[in-house]
Image (cartoon, rainbow, N blue to C red):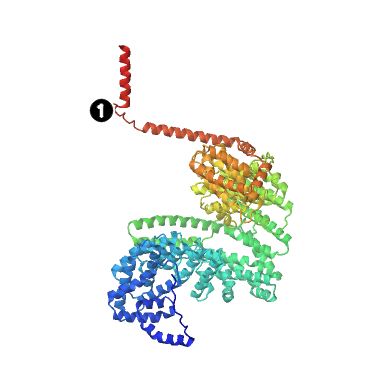
Amino acid sequence: TPRSFPAVDRPTADEKKKWRKKKAPARLKRATMEAIFEDAQLSLAKHRKCTEKLRAMQRKSDRSAFAEEFFGYVACILPVFKREPVAERAVEFVVKYLTEADEENAAEQDELIGTICMALLGLSDAKDKAVRFRVSQLVGRVMNAMPEEAEVSDELFSALEERMLRRCRDKVPVVRACALRALFRLQDPAQPDDAITAELLRMMETDSSAEVRMAAISTIAPSKPAIRALLGRTRDVAEGVRKHALAVIREKVEMRWLTISQRAALLDECLSDRAPSVRAAGVELTRGWLRKADKQVLTLLKALDVSTHESPAERVIAALLRESESRALVASASADWHSLAPEPMLCLRLQLDYLATEAKRTAEPKAEEMLDAAVPDLGAYCEALHRAVGVCRVPTPQGEDGAVPVAATFSLVQLLRISPRLDMANEHGRAELEVELSGLLKDLSVGDELLPPLVGALEAVCVGEGERFGRLMHELISEVDDPLEGADGSVEDDPAGADERLKAEQRRMCVEARLLALHADVKAKVEEEDFEAAAGLKKEAAELQQELQALPAPRGTPEEEAVVRMARCLKLAELLMRAPGVRLAQHEMDVHAQAIFLPALAAPQPKLRTLALRCLGLRALGCPTQAAKTWPLFVKALAHDQLPVQLAALGACTDLLIHHQPEALLPCTPSAPSPAAAPLAPMEDGCSSAIFDLLLPLLRGSDRLLSAAAALAGCRLLHTGRVISSALTARLLLIYFQSDANVGCSAPICAPPDDVLADAGLLDSDRALVDLLCEPKQVLSVFFASCASTAQLGAALLPAIRAVLAAAPGSPESAIPVDSLASFVLTLTRPADEPTEASESLHEAAALALSCEALAAPEEAEGVMLPRVFAQLVLPPAAQCKHLGPLLELLARLEAALSDKTALRTVQKFREHVEVLVQARADAAEACARAGPCADEIVSAHALIRGGDAELSEAIQRERERSRDEQAALNERRRSLTPVKPRPPTKRRLAKGGKATPGMAERLVTQARENTLAN
C-alpha cells in the first residue's frame, strides 16, 4: 500500500547553503576508518590527508586491533577482479600507507606490513581468481614500494617465496604476472641454483601469455643467463614483447656486457624487424649506445667489428643517417677514410649512397652539391687504393690470427665499391685507376672474394662504354689464360732469382721440420712438468714461426698454376657475362668456350667443372641454339657428377627452362584430358612429365642440400608458370611435411663446409643462396602462400594423400600425418572475405573429391582419415554452390558405408550443414543439380582418374595387404603367447526349498516317460 507523506516546502538556495555550513564540521569530525577509505577511493589527491588521519588513528589505537580492522577494509578490495578506478585507487592508498612512514614509526610500520602481508598470503590459494589476483597485486606492490634498506622477517620471506612461486603457475595470466612482480626483490641471480631466477627464466621463455612474458622481462635482474634470455625475447612472436625486451635491454644492460656477436645479432634483428614499432625501439637502442660511446660513431662501430659483421653495421649507419642529429656524426667519422680503417671506409660508402639517393629523390641542387663535396678526389682515391693493396699483401704478424688481412681486405672492398660514385672526368686518374684494376685482376695472388668488386670498379671506370669494358675483360681473360713470357716474372726468371728461390724453399723445409720437432718436445716437457724448458722451446718456436712468415711464399708446380689460371679465367668470364648492359659478341664467347669452358669440363677438379657449367649456362641464356646443344650436358652432370657440379647444373637447367620455352629443351607429350565431372582433377601440361622425371631423383635423394636446391628449382618453375604439374606440387607438399617427422630435407640443414662451397663457386657472391637452402621449409611456405589463390595447390591434395598412403614403412612419406596435410591445404585455400571464383568452388570440389576418395575404400585408411577433414571445409553460400545435390547424396552414401565412429560423426555434422544450405536455396540447389553432373557421374570420373596411375594403385594395394598380413601375424602371436585358462570343474545346481530346478524336472519327466514305455 503506497504511503502518503505530508507536503513539505522545498528549501531555498540560502537554506541549503546554511545547511551545508552547519553540517560540514560534523562531517569533518567523523574520522573513522570507513570514512577514510571512502575518501581515499574517490581521488588520488586525497591520499595524503587520508594517510595523515589514519596515521593519527593508528597512534591512538591498539596495534592488533588496528591491524585487524585495517585488514578488514583491505579485504573489501579482494573480490573485485576488474581494474576499476575505484579499486585501483584503494590499492594505491593501501600501498602508500604501508610503505611511507617516518623513522620513529618504522618498527611499528614493519610489524603492520608483516601482519597484513601474512594475512593476505593466507588467501593466495583461494578458489576465486579475483582474490588470487588482488592478493598477488597487493603483496607485490607493497614489497616493491618498500625502501631499499628495508628488511622483512624470515617467516614472511619464506611464505612470500613459497606462495608466489605457486601463483606463478596459476591458470589466470594476470595472476601469474602479479606473482612475478612480487618476486622481484627476492631473487638472487648470483646464486646459480636460485629457484626464483629459474622460475623467471622459465616463464620468460615458455609462458603462453605475452603479458606474463613482458612481466618476467621487467622483473628479472641482469645476469648472464638473464641476458641470453632477454636476447631470445627480441625474437618473440609478439610485437609488444620484442619491443619491451629492447626497452629493458636499453635500460638495464650495458653494451660491454654483450659479446660482439650478440651486439651484432641484436642490432641486425631489431633494425630489420617487420614491425615499425620494434624498428623504432631498435633505433632508440642504437642512440642509447651511441650516447654511452660519447657520440663517437667509430667507437660504436668498433664495438660491432664491422669487418666480420657488415650487415648490422650497415643497418646502424643507415639508421643514424636518417636522423638529422646523427648525420653530422657519420660525416665526421667518414672524414678519416684516408687511414683505410674499416669503420671510416664503411661510413664513407654508406654516406655517399645515402646522399646519392637523396639527390635522386629530391632533385635539388643543394643535395647535388653535398654529394659532390663528399665524393673523394680521383687522385687521392687512386693513392688510397694503391696503399690498400699494399696493406693486403703484408704478411700477418704472429699472434693476431689473421685480423690485419681481414680488416685490410674489408677496407679494400669498401674502397672498390665507392668507385661508381667517383667523377671520371680526370683522364689521367681514370687511366691510372684502370691500370691498377687490370693488374689486380691478372694477379693470381688476389683472393676470389675481391674479383666481383674489382670487376664492378672496372665497369665504373668504363662508364658509358660497354664495348670498351667487354674488350678489356676479353683481353684480361686471354692474358691470364696465356700470359706473356716474363711479363710478370712468373714464367721465366734469371738464374740469380732461381737460386734465391731454391735457397728459400730449402730453408722453409728446414724450419717446418724443426717446428714439428719442437712441438713434440714441448708436449714431452709439459708431461714431465718441466715448464721452464717448455717455455724456452716455445720461444724458439715463435722465432722460427716469424722467420717462416718472412720467407717468400712457395711457388706451386706448373700443373697447380695452370689450374689456378683456368679458374681465374672462368670466374672472369662468369663476371663478364653477368655484367648488366654489356652486349657480348657470339664469336668472342665461342673462342672462350672452345679454349676454356669445354677443356675445363674434362678437368679432374670439381671446382673447374662447376665454374665451366656455370659459364656455359650463362652463355646458353642468350642463345636458344646453344641452350639446346648444351642441355644434354647439363642433364648428364646433374645425374652423375659430384655435389658442387650438380648444384651448378641444376641452377643452369632451371635458368634455361625459365628463360627459354621448355618445349625447346624437353620432349613434349600431351597429357590426356581429365573427365569434366571429376572434382579436383590433376593439372598437367605437355612438359610436366619430363620436368618431374628430371627433379624427382634429386627430391628423393639422400643429399639434403641437393634436395633442397631441387625443391627451390621446382618452386621457381611452378611460380613462373613454366610448368603446370600437380604431381610436382604434391611432391613439394610431402617435402614440406617431412620436417615434422624429423626426416627428409625440410629439417634444418647445416651449411656445408667452406671447401665444398668454394668448389661450387658459392663462397663469395651466392652465400645467401646457401643460407636459403638451409631452410627449405621457409621457402616452401612462401611458395604455397603465393599459389593458394590458384587451383594448382588444391589439385595436388589428392596425389599427395595417395603418395602418403602408398609409402613403404620406414620411408619419410609414411610418417606424414594425412589429416595435417589435408588441413594445411584447406586452410591455405579457405575463401577470403571477398573470394574469387577459384576460391569459391575449391572447397566444394574438395568436399566432392574427399567423399569419392573415402567411398573408394570406406574400411581402409581413406575411410578413417579423410572424413575427419570435413571440419576444415568452408563452403560458399548456397547461391554460389553448383553441386549441393550430388554432394548431399555422396555424403549419405558415405555415412552408410563408414564404420569408424569419429569419421561418421564428422560426416553427419557436415551433411547437416549441407542440408541447411540446400534448404536455404532449394530452387538454386535443384537448378544446380539439374545442370551439373550427378553423383554417379562424379564417382565414375573420380574412379577413372584414380585408376589411371596403375603403379600408385598397385603400391596402395600392396601396402594394404602388407598391413593386413602384419595385423594377422600380430594377432596370431598374441594368441600364441596368451596362456590357456584351465577349464573350470562342472558344477551341479541343487534344488532350492525342496523344488527341482527346470533342468532336473525335465530330466525326471523324460526318465518317467522312458520307464512307462519300457513297462
Give coordinates of residue 946: x percent, y percent: 60, 38
Q: Nearer the viewer, residue 127 or 114?
A: 127
Query: In the figure, is residue 959 to the left or right of 989?
Result: right
Q: Circle 1 — which element?
A: loop
Q: Is residue 453 visible?
A: yes
Label 1 neighbour load within 10 Å: few <14, some 14-19, many 20+: few
480 to the left or right of 110:
right
Residue hosting label 1: 994
Amino acid on which disc 1 is placed: Gly
Instruction: State the image coordinates of residue 404 (x, y, percent, origin top left).
Output: 52, 65
Which quadrant would residue 92 be assigned to in this image? bottom left
Up the image or down, 152 lies above or below 767; here it is below
> Does 573 appear above or below 347?
above
**Residue 319 pos. (x, y %):** 57, 70
Residue with the most extreme top position: 1015
Classify 1000 as above or below 906.
above
Is residue 391 visible to the viewer in this orientation of the structure? no
